[in-house]
Amino acid sequence: MLDEQRMQEQMLALGGTYIMNHAKRTLVIARRLAKSEQLPYDEEVLVFSCFFHDISAFLPYRPEGSFDHAEESAKIMPALAKEYGIDESKTGAITEAVRYHDKRGKGTANETMLLRNADAIDYLGFMAVARDFSKQPIEMSRAVAALKKHRREFAALLELQSAVRMAEKRIQNLDLFLSEFEIESLGIY
């Protein structure tokens, strides 16, 4: 049995509540998608993948220079899964889910599709606004540019019909925010 408390503590130490809560929300969304789609999944694979899919974005796991965070996080999975006592037979599914969590149509495991769609949903709507503005607190023009980019990229990752439905209101809210922000900022941003 996975120690979710230990995983939460590790994520909190790496990236604060920002990344820990993203991992928790992703897991909740993934479980909801699985239920809606009636997709079977391995609980241990899904939980571990949801918690650690972005681990390479944080020290000491972050590589130097430019990198594909999904690919780098996937490289970490076998050793990290072993630290958590996960059976080696599940490492392949975990690695696949992490590697392809941001690449539409890649991977075959249900956990991969659930993680990808859940992660995309969590990066849409007002949550996206909070996330991007918290990353760029003194550079609002960068935050707006990131929001527009993320709006396109994450909406394009949605594959499951239940994910498309779940994301619909979030996308509307994000579009509304961007439109109103442009009006209220008098076109400065």
Image: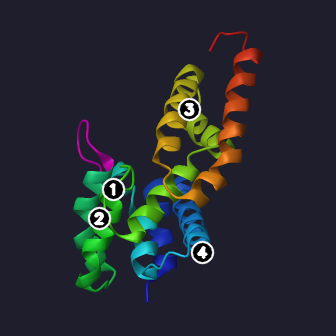
At x 48% / y 42%, what residue is drawn?
156
Please say whether residue 5 is one of the residues in the magenta stretch.
Answer: no
Residue at the bottom extreme of this rendering: 1
- The CA span between labels 4 and 2 is 21 Å
Please say whether residue 63 is one of the residues in the magenta stretch.
Answer: yes
For the residue marked with disc 4, what is the amino acid? Lys
Query: The C terminus lies in which quarter of the figure?
Result: top right
For the residue marked with disc 3, what is the amino acid? Leu
Image x and y of residue 6, in percent: 46, 77
Q: Earlier in the sequence, mark 4 or mark 3?
A: 4
Q: Earlier in the sequence, mark 4 or mark 2?
A: 4
At x 51% / y 34%, what residue is drawn?
152
- The CA span between labels 1 and 3 is 22 Å
- The CA span between labels 1 and 2 is 6 Å
Marks 1/2 in contact by CB < 8 Å: the verdict is: yes
For the residue marked with disc 2, what is the amino acid? Glu
The residue that label 3 is drawn on is 147
Q: Quadrant of residue 115?
A: bottom left
Looking at this view, is 1 or 31 the one in front? 31
Number of the front mark, 4 or 2 = 4
- The CA span between labels 3 and 2 is 27 Å
Number of the front mark, 4 or 3 = 4
Image x and y of residue 49, in percent: 40, 68
The residue that label 2 is drawn on is 96
Magenta stretch in the rendered image? 62-69
Determine whether, in the image, residue 89 is placed left or right of residue 176: left
Secondary structure of the residue carrying numbered label 3: helix
Q: Earlier in the sequence, mark 4 or mark 1?
A: 4
